Image (tube, grey):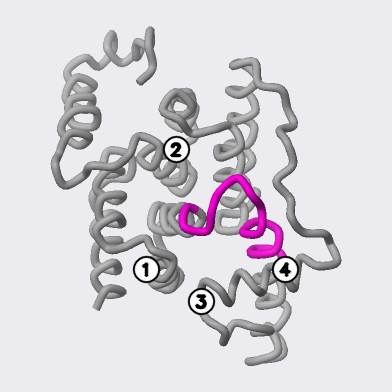
Amino acid sequence: MLPGWESSLQKTDPEFITRFDNFAFDEVINHPAVQLSDKTRFISHLAVLLGCQGVDNFKVMLPVALNMGVTPVEVKEIVYQAVAYLGMGRVQPFLAATNEVLKAQGITLPLESQETTTMKDRLEKGNRVQADIFGEGMLESWKNGPQESAHINYWLADNCFGDYYTRTGLDVKTRELITFCYLYAQGGCEPQLLAHMKANFGVGNDKELLIKIISANIPQIGYPRTLNALRIINEAAS
């Protein structure tokens, strides 16, 4: 996955890293129930590491993801979209790390534009994507409910969906998959996770795929948040 890489932990913590590497990069990857394409696997790894704030591991995994077929544009889109679910306060270090790794690989920045909206039509187009994913009841949803919080629903349409989901570089199925990863990896977002679980089912990411994703990321996220996600997957499926 990363030719020539040697972990410093082989010198300081050889027993630990031998067991971890055996589990993460042999037992998990080769288990019959966790078979994914390399690209999907590493897209999920990057999104989960953003969600759990594993920036040091993100720096290690990013070159591997690029070797496994994830494009620089796709990497940037994963990082950009995370801002809507994690906030810039938590994503800034990952954006800096991404730029550092891409420059080290000789990739010229900025990358080609992926925008499809303007400041004038981002609300309309973002709201359309919302409705396509969550149902027609989402159209102009900021006009329903309490007036004091209408601005938040408005921003969900023009910013969360209009600024991110309308971009090219990732399709809607992949965008919903990485949103699932951000949410379950950060924890404490169970209502939103349930909503986006149903959205994943709606765009074609089925229960089997989502269980594969959480299984593949156990080495990165651990068992408690994995089991929480599994419970909500089963709840959404029922």
Task: Please identify the quarter of the rendering in which residue 149 is found.
Answer: bottom right
**Cα gap from disc 3 to disc 4, whole angstroms:** 15 Å
Magenta highlight range: 159-174
Residue 58 vs residue 40, the one in the foreground = 40
Residue 216: give x, y in percent of width and height: 27, 43
Q: Residue at x 59, y 29 (%)?
A: 97
Task: Please identify the quarter of the rendering in which residue 233 is found.
Answer: bottom left
Q: Type of residue at label 1? A: Phe
**Cα gap from disc 1 to disc 4, whole angstroms:** 24 Å
Q: Tell me which secondary structure the magenta stretch mostly adopts.
A: helix
**Is there CB contact under 8 Å for labels 2 and 4?**
no
| Mark nearer the N terminus (3 vs 4) | 3
**Cα gap from disc 3 to disc 2, whole angstroms:** 30 Å
The residue pinned by badge 2 equals 54
Task: Please identify the quarter of the rendering in which residue 74 is found.
Answer: top right
Foreground label between 3 and 4:
3
Residue 32: give x, y in percent of width and height: 14, 42
| Mark nearer the N terminus (2 vs 4) | 2
Q: Type of residue at label 2? A: Gly
Q: Type of residue at label 4? A: Asp
Total numbered badges shown on the rendered structure: 4
The residue pinned by badge 1 equals 201
Residue 40: give x, y in percent of width and height: 38, 42
